[in-house]
Amino acid sequence: MKGHRGMRIDVLTIFPDLIRQALSCGIPGRAVDAGLVDVRAHDLRDHTDDLHRTVDDAPYGGGAGIVFKPEPIARALRGIALERPSGKVIFLTPEGKRLDQTMANRLSLEAHLVLLCGRYRGIDERIRERYVTHEISIGDYVLSGGEFAALVLIDAVVRLIPGAVGDAESALEDSFQNGLLDCPWYTRPPVFEGLSVPEVLLGGNHRLIAQWRREEAMKRTRERRPDLLEGQDVERER
Ligand code: 6GU
């Protein structure tokens, strides 16, 4: 990947501290500190105009649950757009397209992402019509809000920005980048609770080690995720 000039991510949420704190740790935290990504968490309540800073309301037509009002979201989005136009506006929802490595790779090339986190029942549909450009889900289960989904997306994307992950742990060598699950890994001691490290890894023959890792990755993928191998050229890895 060439010419990455840093990425900006705006997150619209009623829990901005959750986003900030989660992203202060680990590789995302390092990427933020290194200036590779500028993440701004915006509190939707700062864009309300009533005393109680109300962001939600009962759904028209009745029924359980609460729906995010459109105005605070629209105001927050317009504020961001004035400051920095043309970012993708992504609504995190189980109704969205499922996040996978290919999608994360593509998103990591964007200069600007705006992530909208809903809660409760959802958000007023007119926000989706007027402002949202993409809808993404992180899997087929229900979360109580989009914040953890946004964090999953940010982590998956930020680690792909050149420089975020050290050379020794290059993100391009990740499991899934080659369409396979990862091979087993070992470190010292050579014998742990009677269990030995596979002989080949101790031998220092790098060609044999690489071959062993490919075979183990393939074996594991065949056993656990045969769906990943469907339509793949199996000979490609040889
Ligand atoms: Cl993006 N949001 C919520 N609320 N639940 C989810 C999800 C997103 N992805 C899977 N479940």
Image: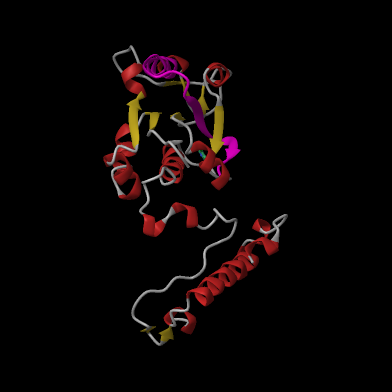
Residue 158 shown left or right of residue 227 in the figure: left
Farthest right residue in view? 231
Name the residue located 48 percent from the left edge and 57 percent from the top edge. Answer: 173
Say above or below: 168 vs 42: below
Name the residue located 47 percent from the left edge and 84 percent from the top edge. Answer: 199
Nearest the camera: 41 or 30?
A: 30
Image spot of residue 25 (x, y percent): 30, 47
* Magenta stretch, residue numbers: 73-100
Nearest the camera: 149 or 118?
A: 149
Nearest the camera: 190 or 17?
A: 190
Location of the C terminus (image quadrant): bottom right
Name the residue located 30 percent from the left edge and 46 percent from the top edge. Answer: 30
Image spot of residue 126 (x, y percent): 55, 17
Say above or below: 103 vs 126: below
Nearest the camera: 189 or 129?
A: 189
Say above or below: 228 vs 87: below
Residue 63 shown left or right of residue 116 in the figure: right
Q: Based on the displayed image, in which of its 4 quarters is residue 84 positioned?
A: top left
Q: Based on the displayed image, in which of its 4 quarters is residue 3 positioned?
A: top left
| 99 inside magenta stretch | yes
Please give the count of numbered marks on the rendered protein: 0
Name the residue located 46 percent from the left edge and 41 percent from the top edge. Answer: 153
Farthest top residue in view? 49
